[in-house]
Image (tube, rainbow, N blue to C red):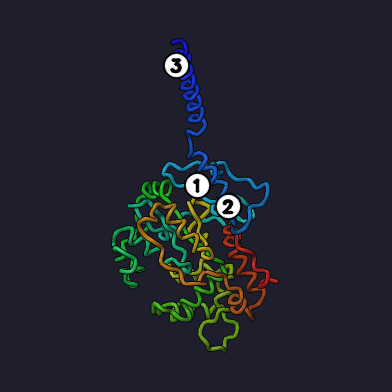
Amino acid sequence: MHHQWLLLAACFWVIFMFMVASKFITLTFKDPDAYSAKQEFLFLTTMPEVGKLPEEKHIPEELKPTGKALPDSRLIQPLVYMERLELIRNVCRDEALKNLSHTPVSKFVLDRIFVCDKHKILFCQTPKVGNTQWKKVLIVLNGVFPSIEEIPENVVHDHEKNGLPRLSSFSDAEIQKRLKTYFKFFIVRDPFERLISAFKDKFVHNPRFEPWYRHEIAPGIIRKYRRNRTETRGIQFEDFVRYLGDPNHRWLDLQFGDHIIHWVTYVELCAPCEIMYSVIGHHETLEDDAPYILKEAGIDHLVSYPTIPPGITVYNRTKVEHYFLGISKRDIRRLYARFEGDFKLFGYQKPDFLLN
């Protein structure tokens, strides 16, 4: 009997120790998600990036990574996108560049911003940077067409039919509400390569059959900026560069109206120093940026960005050199002086191979 009591007491002791050990294990590992999030942050900080963050770089408190999940369970922005936003803030604070980086949020800017109220998205249009495809994405999200493939090409840019309201169509209070609370983004590309694309699209190929570019705008540029008055060829890229680099270009811009959106600066189009955008995409990394933007906007399960043809987003220095061949350094420098804000705000390298 005595041995039975000893055995029973020993069993109770083992059970008691097991309960204590289990409690310790539970306290130690009760938050597996915290470890998972920490591992995710470590991955983000060691993954290959486009341009390494400089050492000792200051990141604003509101942009600092925490390793925690956002309220909607999406992870915080990878560092490459944070770096782009921080660069914009730094350049916006540079007093020496204020004239090149700041612009009023005028009706011209609000006309460039398209609204998707259903999913709380604002998209600022920057022509010649793949905007047609993003407009198709928003058209589908707004429910005008069930899929991107079913949208007729002639509807995409027809603002009477495409179902894309502009931010300028709302009251001041509604505009401010959307600017403060909606997901906001736009896309950029190398500024000089964008100008080449605009020139080819509007004055050379003109695939949308917009005759006013060749028959009204081109003659106006030639009359003002062609040096050899006896030359009878159509508009040349040199004429275009001279017009864009002229500090007094605005009087012609007023005559051309909204057609200038294809070549004015990103600053003039989207006011990045006045509007706090959620993400800035780059045309050169669109294969990565497009899925990221869809995910951050919370719409990746609803629509996909159209397939990107291989090589179409790669910066082509040879093409840039070809177009600027024979154009005077003075004219190129004046052009750069106008677009310097775009180069600096979005991290594009100064084209010294053209300027020097």
Tell us which disc is closer to us: 3 or 2. Answer: 3
Task: Give the quarter of the image for residue 236.
Answer: bottom right
Instruction: Please name the residue that numbered disc 1 is placed on.
Output: 76
Give the number of the disc on residue 83: 2
- Residue shown at 49%/64% (left/top)? 287
Neighbor class of circle 3 (other Cα within 10 Å; few <14, some 14-19, many 20+) is few
Residue drawn 56% across the image and 49% down it: 43
Q: In the orientation shown, which residue stands out farthest toward the right?
A: 356
Q: Nearer the viewer, residue 217 or 229?
A: 217
Percent of width and height locating residue 224: 54, 78
> Would you place residue 60 above or below residue 228 in this image?
above
In the depicted structure, whether residue 73 falls above or below residue 215: above
Distance from label 3 to label 2 (Cα)?
A: 66 Å
In the figure, residue 206 lies in which quadrant? bottom left
**Label 3 vs 2, first from the N-terminus:** 3
Secondary element type, mark 2: helix
Q: Horizontally, is 77 left or right of 336 in the view?
A: left
Q: Which SS class for mark 1?
A: loop
For the C terminus, the image quarter is bottom right
Give the residue type at disc 3.
Leu
Q: Nearer the viewer, mark 1 or mark 2?
A: 1
Q: Position of residue 41 (x, y in %)?
A: 55, 46
Q: Please report the residue visible at 59 percent of the width from the left and 57 percent of the height from the top.
A: 49
Disc 3/disc 1 C-alpha distance (Å): 55 Å
Image x and y of residue 181, in percent: 41, 46
Q: Earlier in the sequence, mark 3 or mark 1?
A: 3
Q: Nearer the viewer, mark 3 or mark 1?
A: 3
Whichever of labels 1 and 2 marks the residue nearer the N terminus, that label is 1
Which residue is disc 3 drawn over? 8
